[in-house]
Structure formats: C-alpha cells, structure tokens
Amino acid sequence: MFDIMKKKWIFFGIAIVLCLISVVSLLFQGFNLDTDFSGGIALTYEVGSDFNTSDIEAIVSEALGANKSASSVQKSGSDVIIKVGYDKGLSDDERTEYSSTTKDAITTALASKYGNAVVDETAALESDVFTDTESAAAEPTEAVTDAAADTSADNAAAITADVADTTESAALESGVRLKSMDDISPSSGQELARSAFWMSLLACAAILVYITLRFEFTSGCVAIVALVHDVLLLLGVYSLFRWSVNINFIAAVLTVLGYSINNTIVIMDRIRENTRHSRKESYGEIANNSVWQTMTRSINTTVTTLLTIGMVYILGVASIKAFALPIIIGIVVGFYSSVFITGPLWATWKDSAVKAKKANTAAKKK
Amino acid sequence: MSRSLVKFAAIILVIAALLYVGLYGLDFTDKVRFPGVTDSDGITQGLDLKGGTVIVFKADAADPSEQDMETAMSMLRKRLDFQGYTEASVTVQGSNKIRVELPDVQDSDKAVETLGATAQLEFRDANGATIMTGDQVKEAKSEYGQTQQGMTKSQYYISMTFTDEGREKFSEATRTAASQSSSGMNYIEITMDGNTLTRPSVRQQIDSESCIIEGEFTAEEAKALAANISSGRLPFSLKTDEVKVVSATLGEEALNKAITAGIIGLILVMLFMLIMYRLLGLMADIALLFYVSVVLICISVFHVNLTLPGIAGIILAIGMAVDANVVIFERLREELKLGKTVRSAVDAGFNRALSAVIDSNVTTIISAAILWWLGIGTIKGFGLTLLMGVVISMFSAIFVTKFLLKQMIGMNVKAPWLYGLNKNKTGAESVKGGEA
C-alpha cells in the first residue's frame, strides 16, 4: 500500500485537468438538450424488420418537407427514437396542430416503407380480454376498417389506434408501430430547467449545512470540493460526448449529489476519530491512515451499488438506461474523489493553516 | 444458547412471513384484505409502466387565481367522469398547469380535444346575438334514437334540460324566431366554442324545459359533448403544454426488464456479501431480505405510484442498503484484528460505525427528499422510493443485523474465520488508530 500523501499532486493534477476539460466543454459546447428541455416531439417506434438509422432519417426528412429534418434519430434495439424540434415563434395552437400533423406524417411515411403493424394474433386475442371496453380511445372496428381503406392518412390513424387495442401486449411480427410519444412545449422545458436548477442548489446548500454542523469547517469544505468535482465531471462527460440531457439526468445528478458524498463522509468520520486519538501523527499520516483503513469499505460499497444499478443499465429499456448511466458515472467519479482527493486535501489544508498560525505567533514574538 | 436459537429462528420466521405478505398479501376471510405486490391491485403502476396518456394543460391566462385553477380542475374531473375515464387523475402542477393522467388511453389527440375545450355553449339568434349560454342548461346527456317522427334511421343526439331561467329565455327566443319565418331568419344556432353544432329552424314558440341537439355525432362525440355541456365552461382556455403517450407494450416490457434487473442485482449483492463477509454477510443478506419485504409492503400499503425511475430507486437502494453493513463489518473486522473477542468486537463495531452510517445516509436522504418534494412527474416517484429505501435500509442494517449477530454469538458461533478474519493476521500492523 502506497502513501497517498506522497502522490497527492498526481491525484490533484488528474482531478484538476479533468475538471478543466469539463468546464471548457460546458462553456463552449454546452449540453445536447433533449426535448424535455428544448421542447419538441419525441416518437418511439418499434420496427419489425431490420432497419438502419440513415434510411429512417431520410424518410423523416421527406415526411417533414420544407427542408426540415429530425433533430435526432436513434436506434435502440428494435426501436427507433425520432426527435423533432419546434420552430421558434409558433403559437400554442399552431404548435399543437404541428405536432399532430408531424406525428401522422412520420407514421404514414414509416408505414409505407416498412408496412403496417402485423402482430401475433393469438397473443392479441388473449390480451383483448383485459382491454377496457369503456375507455373511449380503443375502437377496434375503426382500426380495422381504416386499415382496409388503405389511404395513407387512414394508415396513420390505424397505426396510432393500434397502440390502443389489438397490440395490447402482442409481439410485433413485422411493420412499424408507435410505442410512445412525448410532446413538450418549449416554455415547459424552460420551466423544468429552472426547477432543476433550484433543486440542485437547494440540495447543495442543505448538504453543506449538514456537513458543517456535523464536522469541522475544513471537512465540510473538502466534502463540498469533492462534490463539485463529481458533479462537474458528470456534467462534463455529458457535454463532451454530446449525450442528450433530459429530466431523468437531473434526477441522476441529484442522486449523485447525495450519494457520492457517502464515501467522503465515511473517510471524514474516520479522520475525525483518528484526530481525537492521535498523539504524534502529522495530518498527512492521519489522512493516509484514514483513507487506507476505510479503503475496503469504499471499494465494497461502490461494488454493491454498481452491481445493482449496473444490472438496471444492462437489462433496462432505453429510458431507464439513460437514467442509470449518469448514476454509474457519478458513483465511479465519486469513488475517485473521495478516496484520492478528500484525505490529502484535508491534510494539506490543515498543514497550511498550522504553518500560517506558527508564522503568525513567530511574528508576534518578534 | 437455546434461547438465542429460539430468538434467531423467530426472527427468520418473522422475515419469511413479511416476505410472504409483501409478495402475496394477506387475506383473512375477506374482511381484512391486504394486497401483495404480485396481486393485480398490489402495485399502483405509473403510466410509464401500464401505458397511457399524460396531458399537461396550461391556463391561457396571465395569472390565474387559485380558485379558477380549482374550478378548472374540478371541471376536467367531471368531464372525465362523464366519459367513463374513472381511473384518470387530475392534479395541479405549479401555479398555472393542470396535469391529467389517463391510464390505458392512447389516442391523445381525441383526449386533448375534448378535455381542453373551453366548452362555451351558446344559443344564438339569426343575427348572431347570444340568447343564452350553457350556464342555463341544467343537465345534458347523450342519447340514441329517432329524433323526429317518420325518420327511419336512429342517431346519436344530445338531450338537454334547462333551468327555469333558461326555459324562459328559450321560450322567448323561439317566439321571436317563429315570427320571422317569412324572412327565413327563423332559426336558432347552437354553438360550442364558436363552432356551429346545429341550426334548427323554429316553426313555433317552444315552451319546454328540454331540447335536443342533433348533428352527425358518433357515440363518443355525443358523449363528450354532453359531458362538456354538463360540466360547464372553463374559466379560461387551456393550451396543451405537454403530451406523453406510452403504449402498454412498452410499459410491460419496461416493468419486466426492471424486475429482472432487480432480482439479479439482489442476488449478486447477496453473493458478494456472502463471499466477502462469510457469516456476517449471511446475516446482512437476511437483513437485506427484511429490507426487501418491508419495501414491498410499504409500496402496497401506501399505494406508492410506482414509476420506472421509482423502480430504479428501489433497486439502487438495494445496493446502498448493504453500505451500512459494509461500514459496520469493516469496523468489526478491525476490532477483531486488534485482538478483541468476537462479542466485544461486534459491540464496538456497531457503536463506532454508527456515526459514519448516519452521517453518510443523511446526505442521500436530503437529495431524495428534495426530489420527492420538488420533482415533477416520474422524478417524484424516484425521490420517494429512494427515500423510503435509504431509511428502511438504515434501520435494517443497524438493528436487524445486530440482533441477528447477537443471537449468533449467543449460540457460541465464534470462529474468527466466520467473521471474515483470516488466520494469518496480515495487514493488522498497518492498522493504526481506532484504539479506545
């Protein structure tokens, strides 16, 4: 086991460089905001046959017309997620109109290329038993007649209605079907961003207050430095790789805010205890011992948490993957900062405070 | 020893019972019924799991009063009830938004149209002047049948009952209209939000408390229209701010995958603990099962609206749940290495680790609480389950594990190897501090 204090500048250096890269990326590149924040339409279709995203991009551009194209087309297993932004300056009514026509246009275009949804009939029949006939949206006869009529506009209606009835839980054999739709106004996105900002600020403030109350001020500051490091790197990764940022990302950031500080606190707790019992050890020795004494624990806790959230990432559907990934990154980054930054930083801070005090008293003696 | 064995067996039985109740519920001769998560009514599934439509309406008014929002909300509720959306929920979001959740509904366009309509019903004369409004209609319902004698085809129509004031006005208006029959101006127009529904001609004065509106309605249209007339006019028009539709297929897929992830995650964590901490790990695993059962019971008892992020919160909390045990066990091992007896090492381990366990969990509790308190939509659910998970796990890690270990010691199970200590005490030298 090596002395963390001796290598502290390497650890600090790595952290500082990564933070700088994050800051630069955030300043110059910003975020790739999802429709949650920017407003727009997100459509998820299941495609029964093989497809590639460039084909779909072309189909969507053609369907939208007027030199417009989807802001993103993303493949996720057999699903494709298509996102279309709104033009600026649309009134609320124009926007509602636009979203409805856009949805139909894209659905029709995809259906003419890949065919209408054909599902496993037996499964559909079984599931029909559970379909609530009272719900006005499900109108099986309408869907059937519309499909038979075979005009393109009716195709769109049939597929949209399909989501409601025949396909309740039936497996898709071929064709396309709409799995989910999100339609968010730009003003709603701005509001969301604002509330996310206030939530994060409130969480930081509350955590700072708690740590300062429970620990001495230096520890509180060190913990906050680690926290800022974790969140900054997490934001930086998303900015740098242009991964899309949505509301779930905010929840993930707040979770990381609360959780990544766990390791730091356990180390600080050990430092607090060791300082109480120490006689001759320097701050550096105390920090080094405390970090190593808690090392197994830091690793094990990180592993167990990664085991569960990692499973969610591996097995989950697209939306939950997008939620699990930032938490995973946050946990890994949090491990680094807690173990390699907080201890040495605390000791360095304490030493310089002692030096300053000595210099001060020496000056007074003169 | 025997007493410890009894206690140990007792708690195992209690945990097994809790787990059973959590999964399958309780049912005492139908009087006391209490669903488990595997029961159909055990989990209140969020829309992202069971499929459905979420519509967020924004009031088209600069600064709507709280009372107006309440009125609008209760009207939307009425409209939903009338149309048979009994499972729908309506909540206020922020100061000027109303969130409507429609489980099992996928046709968002229709829902937006009928729910968001201002529903200003007007009776106008031939000159376009308003005779009366929907306020003077006592009741409206959709019916099916022949509206006129001699008609061969039945159709959907809306039958309305007027208030006394409405009856008077209608009578007055029909008298005026009938007198104009020579000029062809003898009709009354019935409009909804400016759109003409019907324009019947009037031949004589009608002094009746009821009237019908015909048009070429489908069953749904007639039902929706009647609902909107009955529930009255909204205090302001509503604009759609957000529409989300999730198909039942996607919801089911998401739920199944999340449950699989949870079970595999749980098994991996249990194996990890068993390998790393041996007997201690086994105790932690039993405590973890206690945690899982309590969480399951809480979900069905408090009708937690379970969303996909909510499930992720529960699974994440499984990983975090053992954290407290890891902290305590590491401490316990250190105490053993210092040469303490197993009994005093367990005591010291728990006592010394307590402050770290509490301090480290409080920060997660703070963030989770903020998400629950201020979060919107599915994020709220995540905050709640994470909060629940952390609090329950802290309890189970501290109290349940300790209780289990005490019984182990009581049964004289004291071999250091079982407590994760290898015979050659490597690393003991490097451990400094921590002595009392």
Image: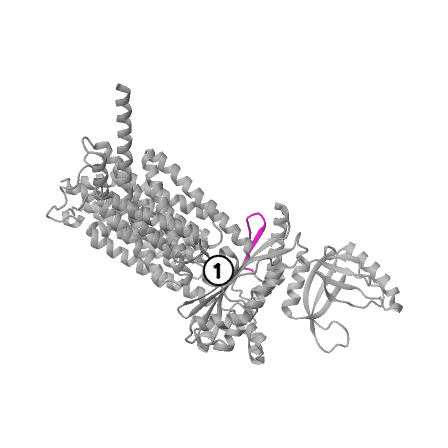
Q: State left or right for residue A7 relative to residue A64.
A: left
Residue furthest to the left in view is B424
Residue B294 visible from this viewpoint: yes
Chain letter belonging to callout 1: B
Q: State left or right for residue B89 relative to residue B265.
A: right
Q: State left or right for residue A168 relative to residue B270.
A: right
Q: Which residues are magenta?
A: B86-102
Tell me what residue is drawn at x 37 percent, y 57 percent: A324
Q: How is the image coloured?
A: one colour
Residue A136 visible from this viewpoint: no
- A39, B290: nearer the viewer: A39
Q: State left or right for residue A150 relative to residue A281.
A: right
User: Residue B8, image x and y in percent?
Assistant: 24, 49
Magenta stretch secondary structure, dominant: strand
- B262, A242: nearer the viewer: A242
Question: How packed is label 1: few (under 14 Cα within 10 Å), some, or many (20 or more)?
Answer: many
Residue B86 found in image quarter: bottom right
User: Residue A355, image x and y in percent?
Assistant: 26, 30
Is residue B96 found inside the magenta-colored segment of the image?
yes
With respect to residue A319, does B348 lie above or below? above
Residue indicated by mark 1: B47
**At label 1, which amino acid type do we have?**
Leu
Tell me what residue is drawn at x 52 percent, y 54 percent: A189
